[in-house]
Amino acid sequence: MGKSKRNGSSAKDNPAFENDLQMVEIHKPKAQEKGAIPQGFECDDHRIPLETLLKRYGTHETKGLKEDQVPVNRAIYGRNVLTPPKKPSLIIVLIKEIWGGLNLLLWACAILCIVSYLFQYVISPGNITPDNLILFVSIVIVVHVSGGCSFYQDFKSDRIMESFKDMVPRQSVVIRNGKRLDLEVADIVVGDIVEVKYGDLIPADIRILESHDFKVDNSSLTGESEPQKRSAECTDDNPMETRNLAFFSTNALEGVATGMVIRVGSNTLMGQLASLASNVDGGNSPLGIELNKFIKIMTFRSIIFGLSFFGVAMFLGYGLQNSVYFVIGIVVANVPEGLALTFTMTLSVAATKMAKKSCLVKHLHAVEALGSTSVICSDKTGTLTQNKMSVAHLWFNNEIAEADTSEFQTGQTFSFKDAGFMALANVAMLCSRANFKPGQENVPVLKRIVEGDASETAILKCMELQFGNVVKYRQKYPKLCEIPFNSTNKFQVSIHDMRNPGDPRYLLVMKGAPERIINLCTKILINDKEYDLDDQWLQEFNKTYHTLGTYGERVLGFCDCKLPLDRYPVGVEFQEDDPDFLDVGFRFVGLISMIDPPRAAVPDAVAKCRAAGIKVVMVTGDHPVTATAIARAVGIITPGNETIEEMAINKGISVKDINPADVKAAVVSGAELKLLSPDELRNVLRHHEEIVFARTSPEQKYIIVDAFQDLGFIVASTGDGVNDSPALKKADIGIAMGITGSEVSKETADMILMDDNFATIVTGVEEGRLIFDNLKKLLAYQLADNIAEMYSVMFFIILGVPLQMGTIAMLLSVCGTDVFPALSLSYETAEADIMKLKPRNPREDKMVTPQLLSYCYGQNSFMEVFSGYFVSCVCYMCNGWMPWALLWNQSAWNSKAINDMKDSYGQEWTYYARQELTFTCQTAFFISIVLTQIANVYCCKTRRMSLYQKGIGNMRMNIGVSIAILLACFLIYTPYLNFYVNFRYVRPEMWLAPLPFMLYMHFYDEIRKLIIRSSTGWLPTEMNF
């Protein structure tokens, strides 16, 4: 009696087996604000008497619905089909891509071009040039190509998504009018009687009428990884907690059951949870916000420059008509026509690279969002862990032995000469109903499919790795009788013929709840010796049991007994329904504990996140003890950091006496979270470096994400179940699981992990940070060219010199020769310290900064335009025109009436000769821009590192530069083509004239980066774009 009491108390003391009945009810109705998550899942079908329920839906407990009642119920309660979220048509999506983002700015530019062309056509039809019309057509082509690339990337991701659509069960066994039918799930109606068995997906929300050892997996709805027992008894008013309900699309893990359909389609719990995401405003992505700001800056800049130079032109006497032309020219020159194309293609390149690393990006802007992440709210099961139970510890010979829980389990083996281990292994192999599916002899043990529950699967694989052939071992000792595990007995028993002529006694082996097993034992095996199970050994058992429980592991006890021949002679028949062998006195042989262990790469990934300034928070539906154990194993809670409860226990004081500021780690249960106000929750998030949320509901996961966002964090949230969808939609980037994820979560997410591995997220973060860096480099590269061209238009207006870069040349530069070097920037590798920097603060570290504009406007673009004017002046001088002779001479230079204008040496030039010279010098200016942009792209390779440190190993950049030069040569030296694009032949030595400026740009940039690396204060901050 005393022994039973002691053992019972030990079970209650074991944290791993505490009965947590405080899971938050996500369905409790309460007032909602507009746009809040709906919480109503009102249901009394599990509480009311069965007779009342049958009458409510017009059905019969054994015969099911009558045929004439089926259409009536379908009309009232709907069809058993989940209503998919409305998606815009592909045409609408394509139009948004073509007209949205940076393309909107280009459309404005295109409209100005066509307006300018039409204006010229009306005012002076005989003196019209096609430049603006060509520019209009070119911009229209560019926006369609850019929008098409973005549309194709999203379309390709959606096609991949179609391959995942296997969530909903297809057929089910239904009883109607007393007949057993196989029906499509969509044809099931409320009131149908259905039969489900191991391996099935539940076809609708059902109330259990009859069951036998029936367990379901509710993890896709609640995050609870433990198999849930289901029976006909109502055990809780909360429909999520009661045992007599099973929910649509959850998995049946064990046993069989008969149930009555009470909810179908969108009215099921899954349907209601799936609809939550459609009510959540996901907001704009960080990159989308940056692009909107960039568009505003570009628009404001264009307006300011346009109006300013309109005034300058009017002051210089150009007249209203010419001044309007100048305004349009300035605005068009301000807009980087090629940026939308290279921007989209750069994001597409990054998405392709991430796909090769098992990250499927559904939306291009999500590529950069992951790099901006400052908090990752990660699910536990399958993401941080392997999503499979493994044997973690064995207790035999009064010692805890650690098993190998790595993903490949190539660690230690146990000695076959150890009698204690062999006795425990014997029970583990024989007392089991798990079996490998046939035909897997050549499949590695860890990858074999097992018919059996998670615990037995773990034990079977562990023993198979140790002994080689468990099936053959069992065949040697035939099973005579078996009592399966049930919630009443809490043990499983089998009796075997050991085929030992010297000892014909039958062997009884048993496993089950440790406190139940120990109560049935009178002996304990230690080092091949049997000892009486006295208080000392019970104390050792309790200590070990509690220790394994604190690890968050599921523990099973094992015992055996050789049945006495006088009571159980050879050939006796055992009664499974009325066992009489529980009082013979068993021998306790040990404990085996199991856990879903962490993935091998996760601890390093979490450490990388910590080094990168990213907070990793676990949000799970599992028990707090299990969640804490995994959090410590993967490094979310680091060694030495204690929760407030652990600190109180270690100091021997009350929790109330602990200063919250001293606590670095927090484990918050769903019940505790429910009691926190929004301000209190934000304080928890703000003041704790390491946080675990356990037993959380879908609503609470959403609240956690929202609270982090309120504090200014960029949040990435992972999830695989329908319950995760609202949080995935709310997060700045939602990440679904490709293998275990539900269809709803994949539809909601921005990104899908094809390998379900947390470490892949960290790879994605690094890629995302890299793409933000590369996009800034891309802006610096392309804006420098664009601004240099704008300066040429400004000098044309102010100094009255011939226009140094024509409209077509500008277009060929930004949409032609610049494109391949620009794209090569997307292949730049990370600078050495990219994952040691803090996450980007979107409020401070923006894509377009004053430093970037200063770099583009006042540094590289100045050097490029000066180089262009230098080369152009050389070209003019070689043809007899000194630079000062061109000042404020534009009106006469472009006059068709003047055909005897004298140059600096007195030679006369006709109008057409002057125009040919202008095209030749514009060609020289174009060559200078192409070459200085080559210098610029190598300057933009890094933002801080020296080019001599980084090297020029990016072969795509080297090839891109070569293509740019070859393209320029093709445009300039191809007969007839050069005439149509207003280029003319220039002497080869003109290609050497920009070289001094290229060298100057290189050495200036090296000095700038040296100052950034070696100095402190305001100067390096201002110089780093």
Image (spheres, rainbow, N blue to C red):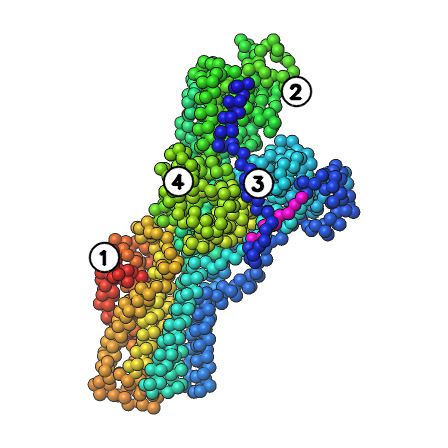
Report, in whole angstroms, how far the alpha carbon at label 1 lies from the one at label 3. Answer: 57 Å
Among the two numbered marks 1 and 4 on one chain, the one whose residue lies closer to the N terminus: 4
Among the two numbered marks 4 and 2 on one chain, the one whose residue lies closer to the N terminus: 2
Residue 501: x and y in percent read 55, 10
Q: Amino acid at mark 4?
A: Ile
Please, what secondary structure does the residue beneath circle 1 have? loop
Crowd band around label 3 with a 10 angstrom C-alpha radius: few (<14), some (14–19), many (20+): many
User: Is 925 one of the magenta-colored residues?
Assistant: no
User: Is 40 one of the magenta-colored residues?
Assistant: yes
Among the two numbered marks 3 and 2 on one chain, the one whose residue lies closer to the N terminus: 3
Report, in whole angstroms, how far the alpha carbon at label 4 lies from the one at label 2. Answer: 55 Å
Dominant SS of magenta comes to: loop
Name the mark on residue 658: 4
Residue 167: x and y in percent read 58, 45
Mark 3, residue position: 218
Name the mark on residue 1015: 1
* Residue positioned 54% across, 40% down in the render: 22
Residues drawn in magenta: 37-44
